[in-house]
Amino acid sequence: MSVLIIDGGTPLKGRVTAQGCKNSALAILAAAALCEDKVYLTNVPDIGDVKTMMGILRSLGYKVTWGNGLTIKPGVIKNYDLTHTGAGAIRGSLLFLGALLGRLGKVVLPMPGGCNIGTRPIDLHLKGLSLMGADLDIQGGNIVGVAPGGLKGAYVYLDFPSVGATENIMIAGALANGETTIENAAQDQQVVELGKFLMACGVKIHGLGTKVIRVKGKKEIGGVTFRISGDSIEAGTYAIAAAATRGTITVDGVDVTFLRPLLFKLQEAGIEVVVTNGHEVTVLPSPRPKGITIKTMPFPGFPTDLQPLMMSLLATAEGRSVITETVYDGRMGHVSELWKMGANIEVEGNTAIITGVEKLTGAPVVANNLRAGAALVVAGLSAEGRTVVYGMEHVMRGYSNIHQKLRALDAKVELVSDEEAVNIA
């Protein structure tokens, strides 16, 4: 177990380069199971979820090595049962449904885990794959699927623009017989990047970044060299941290297209933001932010992954803010921890009403999921006094070397074990 000790109140300053996109990497690693030849990936984030996906690929018979980049060499795939591979620990493993049904015509996968942020149904995944000819059932807590006649292209309408369902159907469609059309598809960064990866492998895809995606299946898919782009959520995290500490940070290496919803809301709150070359964002020192209203939505709406972090920022805003969460019904777990730091937040259903206070004060808090933990780190950086964030292993599932990056930005932080924290905190 890991603990972050934060002595807050220091304005962050400096430059940070966004890591490779976590969610893109997870989707692409699952899609690599489609490939008959070597896949070489660069700018892969060094995080826990990626290592879990690497372990799953190894269990399938792939040779996976990490040097300057990540090399995935296919072997003879004999295993289609992922129940003893650690796949149940992360939600990204769900994407092996489409990959193994397409490649092997069968799969057994534990129900996915990941962050505890409320109900995260898989019905849209199962519906889409069923329309493509897969027979799927839940047995003993596992998803059991077969496609005896192989997957076939189909028309799939998604009731909600689910990122994961869009990705799973795209992956399955890459080896399906015929064309698959996904209507009301997700348009998020990881969906676009997965499509670019599949296209680099020779799959014909039309409509990336729109609500209608068409995938033309192939009989075989070769290998490719591919660079994963910068993570917009990590970049957004550092931008919010700069605003919360009244500091100035430049974040580079990210496609600003996927940061626009955040940048608009920062500017609405009175934070000065400068965009350069479409790949660099600078947050300038700004006065106390103003209260604003946020409603999370699928992209191009405001991202649910940044909702907890914006709550930490708005906890010290002037006036009242209202945040409504529409994507996940359990994404308010950080509120009780922010209360410990002096935040004035009321929760009514999926809406948080935040009355800004002058300052937060350091306290021991617990990260119960990835983005909630990142929000507590942001709160601790801006707070007066010492904050001790327990459960940092959740945060490190999605952020590579976050403590080192923060120290490079003048933050006073130290990552320690639970045992060490007893003597330091």
Image (tube, rainbow, N blue to C red):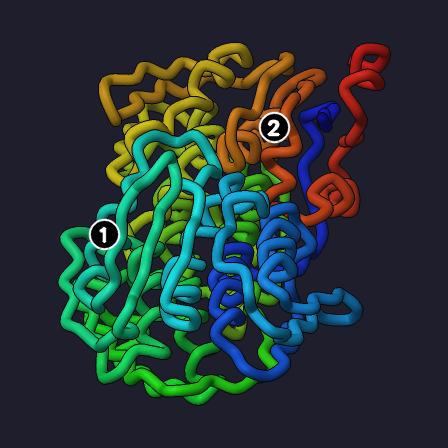
Q: Left of 130 or right of it: where is 87?
A: right
Q: Is residue 115 left or right of residue 171?
A: right
Residue 280 in the image: above or below residue 90:
below
Task: Please say if 62 is above or below 49.
Answer: below
Q: Residues within 10 Å of mark 2 (few under 14, many from 20)?
A: many
Decide if residue 286 is in sight here. Answer: no
Question: Considering only order in the chain, which callout, 1 or 2, is on the residue closer to the N terminus?
Answer: 1
| Numbered label attached to residue 124 | 1
Which amino acid is tagged 1?
Answer: Leu
- Image quadrant occupied by the C terminus: top right
Q: Position of residue 160 (x, y in %)?
A: 19, 51
Point out residue 422 in the picture as x, y percentages from the top left corner: 80, 11
Residue at the image position 51 percent from the left and 31 percent from the top: 369
CB atoms of marks 2 and 1 within 8 Å: no
State the separation of the CA atoms marked 2 and 1.
40 Å
- Where residue 55 sits, quadrant-wise, is bottom right
- The residue that appears at 30% across and 33% down in the rendered structure is 119
In the picture, the quarter occupied by the N terminus is top right
Q: Residue 95 in the image: x percent, y percent?
A: 42, 58
Q: In this picture, is 107 found above or below 99? A: above
Compared across the picture, whether 124 is left or right of 313 comes to left
Residue ID for mark 2: 382
Element at label 2? helix
Identity, as a three-letter code, of the amino acid under mark 2: Ser
